[in-house]
Image: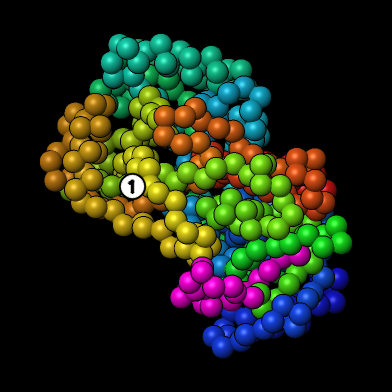
């Protein structure tokens, strides 16, 4: 069990993550039995590891990056969502509402920086007003409390720089320091027998004796791998429970699990979202989050606030082609933000913030959404697959964990831990 092999296992993982010359044939690959493996050290993976460890499980978390939370978890709006947008009884709706309550409680108890700022979803054209009422009705079905429909003058009294005809006010929306949250969750997990190992990539798996065997190798060995040639793992882990929480690489990895039915793996789509920050202002123009009516693939170019009051605009939706598996495993996506993209942002922002001055947007950052619905398609719910879905004992796949994944993280963790 992991309790007896943790030291040895960490040495093995350290060896493979630093070795450039190790070449092992399949029969020579060392094998280790472990209790639970969580693949991916983003906010959801970390929350799952904590929840499993609090239930007495010994957990090993593997991530191909040098540290935790380097991908989607550090490239988002850091917003705590209320639960407004999602179909009633969907996993997104249920987990968002439950997760929001868990997050606020956890942040208050553990001193995680956060702020319940409130949010205004605004209609800037008369044709958008029915969408506001639709969102309000949907939110009520989801159990979101405190929503108020405001006339334009009421919303603009709250936010003098805002221009709109009507607005839906959500008082329970907020922002959070995701890095501090992950550090706290990790600390609790580590104090309950969770081990985090970085620079360690799960490249595949196979079913053997009713157990999924995970193929692990050092991330640096994948840097120059041409996928035309076979690569052998440097370590095989044999867990009782595997949680595939690999985010952007969850789907490509699942396709490399030999024995997992391919027809249960949804297609992968990737939507990059860019952010710009507001410069040349000493006083932030907004105190609340400001969201337009949702668009295809996202929630529109909205106003988010840092905990220090800095204003950010984004993300937009830029559909990108899928990348090869290895680039996905190593998070080799293009996260650059082109200055020319501001030409798209200015007119979108000025729909609700007409006083935005030319030249006041500075390059920010970009993130990529791990989506399972493509351009022009209806949004798809989170997909959480246990044995009943795919027939593989001890495997839980988390697919399409985009927004509201951060808000839902602790609720997802509860759900996954209760599956086993």
The answer to if 73 sits in the magenta stretch is: no
Is residue 170 visible to the viewer in this orientation of the structure?
yes
Q: Nearer the viewer, residue 232 or 77?
A: 232
Q: Residue at x 65, y 33 (%)?
A: 91
Q: Nearer the viewer, residue 15 or 163?
A: 15
Residue 324 position, x and y percent, is 47, 59
The answer to if 218 sits in the magenta stretch is: yes
Start-end of magenta stretch: 213-232
Q: Quadrant of the N terminus?
A: bottom right
Q: Would you say 127 lies left or right of 385 here?
A: left
Q: Quadrant of residue 357?
A: top left
Q: Nearer the viewer, residue 403 or 64?
A: 64
Q: Residue at x 19, y 28 (%)?
A: 354
Task: Report how many numbered discs are placed on residues in the image.
Answer: 1
Q: Would you say 190 lies left or right of 129 here?
A: right
Dot 1 alpha-carbon crowd within 10 angstroms: few under 14, some 14 to 19, many 20 or more: many
Is residue 288 visible to the viewer in this orientation of the structure?
no
Q: Residue at x 56, y 88 (%)?
A: 21
Q: Would you say 134 lies left or right of 7 here?
A: left
- State whether residue 285 is above or below residue 216: above
Instruction: Say which residue label 1 marks.
Output: 274
Residue 214 position, x and y percent, is 71, 65
State how the image is colored: rainbow
Q: Nearer the viewer, residue 400 or 170?
A: 400
Q: Residue at x 25, y 33 (%)?
A: 349
Residue 41 position, x and y percent, is 60, 60
Q: Quadrant of residue 285?
A: top left
- As helix, strand or loop, the secondary structure at mark 1 comes to strand
* Residue sticking out furthest to the left: 358
Residue 156 position, x and y percent, is 29, 21
* Residue sticking out furthest to the bottom: 21
């Amino acid at each position: 069990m992991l309790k007896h092999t943790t030291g040895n296992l960490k040495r093995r993982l350290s060896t493979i993550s630093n070795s450039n010359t190790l070449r092992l044939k399949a029969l020579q690959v060392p094998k280790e039995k472990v209790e639970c493996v969580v693949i991916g050290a983003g906010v959801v993976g970390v929350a799952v590891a904590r929840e499993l460890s609090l239930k007495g499980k010994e957990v090993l978390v593997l991530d191909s990056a040098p540290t935790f939370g380097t991908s989607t978890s550090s490239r988002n709006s850091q917003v705590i969502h209320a639960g407004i947008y999602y179909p009633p009884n969907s996993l997104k709706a249920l987990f968002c509402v439950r997760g929001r309550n868990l997050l606020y409680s956890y942040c208050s108890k553990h001193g995680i920086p956060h702020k319940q700022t409130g949010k205004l979803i605004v209609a800037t054209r008369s044709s958008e007003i029915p969408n506001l009422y639709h969102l309000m009705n949907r939110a009520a079905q989801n159990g979101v409390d405190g929503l108020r429909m405001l006339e334009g003058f009421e919303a603009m009294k709250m936010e003098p720089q805002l221009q709109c005809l009507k607005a839906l006010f959500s008082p329970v929306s907020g922002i959070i320091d995701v890095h501090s949250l992950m550090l706290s969750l990790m600390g609790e997990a580590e104090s309950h027998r969770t081990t985090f190992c970085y620079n360690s990539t799960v490249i595949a798996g196979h079913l053997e004796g009713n157990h999924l065997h995970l193929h692990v190798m050092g991330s640096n060995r994948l840097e120059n791998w041409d996928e035309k040639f076979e690569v052998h793992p440097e370590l095989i882990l044999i867990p009782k429970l595997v949680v595939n929480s690999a985010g952007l690489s969850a789907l490509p990895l699942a396709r490399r699990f030999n024995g997992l039915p391919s027809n249960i793996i949804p297609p992968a789509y990737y939507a990059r979202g860019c952010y710009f920050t507001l410069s040349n202002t000493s006083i932030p123009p907004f105190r609340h989050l400001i969201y337009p009516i949702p668009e295809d693939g996202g929630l529109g170019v909205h106003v988010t606030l840092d905990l220090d009051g800095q204003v950010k605009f984004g993300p937009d939706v830029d559909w990108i082609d899928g990348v090869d598996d290895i680039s996905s495993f190593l998070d080799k996506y293009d996260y650059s933000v082109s200055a020319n993209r501001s030409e798209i942002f200015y007119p979108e922002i000025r729909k609700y913030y007409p006083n935005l001055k030319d030249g006041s947007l500075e390059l920010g950052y970009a993130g990529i959404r791990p989506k399972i619905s493509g351009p022009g398609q209806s949004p798809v719910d989170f997909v959480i697959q246990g044995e009943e879905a795919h027939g593989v004992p001890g495997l839980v796949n988390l697919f399409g964990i985009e927004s509201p994944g951060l808000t839902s993280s602790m609720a997802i963790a509860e759900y996954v831990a209760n599956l086993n």
